[in-house]
């Protein structure tokens, strides 16, 4: 079914947006759609720009899929962090955004309507409910398309194995997620990319407390 959903979009356009988190789902989706569209604009939402370990991944993606256009925009979650003052000085003037706002902005900027996202029903209750609502419409809503909606984690892993896709970054053995203010991620950076940890501290100085408190507890 995934391929027929993508085929329907292809009948309407030869250019699409893809929100690429550099996680398994979005990398698999990029691999599937890459041969099918002439223009693919990959949108990566960053937490802190220019982190070396992420830039290395982006370099790999650009080398493997050379015809993509790759753009980086601030993650919509940052609006909540900056306005609320999480590990930084609060800024009440920041306008709160949702993912749909970022999608709309990218659709307008690039003149591309159809936008692929790698979300699956298997990701959790909220995703399942949301995607169930779009099922009758071929998992498409306002140009946002979810062709992996019915995939399981097992499907994703077996696709990666069959197509020799490398395992994306994991900050811990728990479910992989992006960079964030969680202990696992901070410990991983401290050990593997201390310079990236410093880059995060530059933007969010108060986040130094996370590791400081952890190391104090260990002593």
Image (tube, helix red, strand yellow):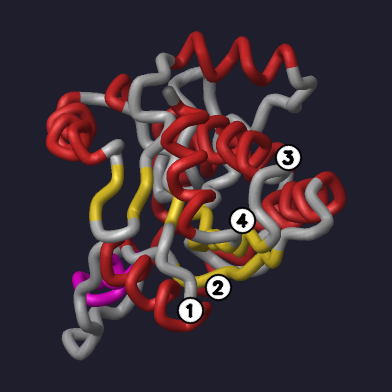
Specify whether residue 195 is in view. no
Of labels 2 and 1, earlier in sequence is 1
Q: Identify the magenta region.
A: 78-85
Q: CA distance from mark 4 to mark 3?
A: 10 Å
Residue in the picture at 59% in, 30% down:
170
Question: Which residue lies most toward the bottom here?
Answer: 93
Whether pointer 1 and pointer 4 mark residues with C-beta atoms closer than 8 Å, the reply is no
Q: CA distance from mark 2 to mark 4?
A: 9 Å
> Measured from the top left, where is residue 70 in percent x and y?
67, 65
In the rendered image, the vertical position of residue 64 relative to residue 92, given as above or below? above
Q: Please rate how many residues cluster around mark 4, counting C-alpha atoms within 10 Å: few if below 14, some from 14 to 19, many from 20.
A: many
Marker count (numbered): 4
Q: Is residue 44 left or right of residue 194?
A: left
Read off the residue under disc 4: 197
Q: Quadrant of residue 195?
A: bottom right
Of labels 2 and 4, earlier in sequence is 4
Q: CA distance from mark 2 to mark 1?
A: 35 Å
Q: Please rate how many residues cluster around mark 2, counting C-alpha atoms within 10 Å: few if below 14, some from 14 to 19, many from 20.
A: some
Of labels 3 and 2, earlier in sequence is 3
Which structural element holds mark 3? helix
Question: Residue 111 got which mark?
Answer: 1
Q: Nearer the viewer, mark 1 or mark 4?
A: 1
Of labels 1 and 4, earlier in sequence is 1
> Measured from the top left, where is residue 16 in percent x and y?
53, 60
Read off the residue under disc 2: 202
Q: Main secondary structure of the magenta part?
A: helix
Residue in the picture at 34% in, 54% down:
144
In the rendered image, the vertical position of residue 6 relative to residue 62, given as above or below? above
Q: CA distance from mark 3 to mark 1?
A: 39 Å
Q: Is residue 187 left or right of residue 174?
A: right
Residue nearest the viewer, comparing 29 with 202 = 29
């Amino acid at each position: 079914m995934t391929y027929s959903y993508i085929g329907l979009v292809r009948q309407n356009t030869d250019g699409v947006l893809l929100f690429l988190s550099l996680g398994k789902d979005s990398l698999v989706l990029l691999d599937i759609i890459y041969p099918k569209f002439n223009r693919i604009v990959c949108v990566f939402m960053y937490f802190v720009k220019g982190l070396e370990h992420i830039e290395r991944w982006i370099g790999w993606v650009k080398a493997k899929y050379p015809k993509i256009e790759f753009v980086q925009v601030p993650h919509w979650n940052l609006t909540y962090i900056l306005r609320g003052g999480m590990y930084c000085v609060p800024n009440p003037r920041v306008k709160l955004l949702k993912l749909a706002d970022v999608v709309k902005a990218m659709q307008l900027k690039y003149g591309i309507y159809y936008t692929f996202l790698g979300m699956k029903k298997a990701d959790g209750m909220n995703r399942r409910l949301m995607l169930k609502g779009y099922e009758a419409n071929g998992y498409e809503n306002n140009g946002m398309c979810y062709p992996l909606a019915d995939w399981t984690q097992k499907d994703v892993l077996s696709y990666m194995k069959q197509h020799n896709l490398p395992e994306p970054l994991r900050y811990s053995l728990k479910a992989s997620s992006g960079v964030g203010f969680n202990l696992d991620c901070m410990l991983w950076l401290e050990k593997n990319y201390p310079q990236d940890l410093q880059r995060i501290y530059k933007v969010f100085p108060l986040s130094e407390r996370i590791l400081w408190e952890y190391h104090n507890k260990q002593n």
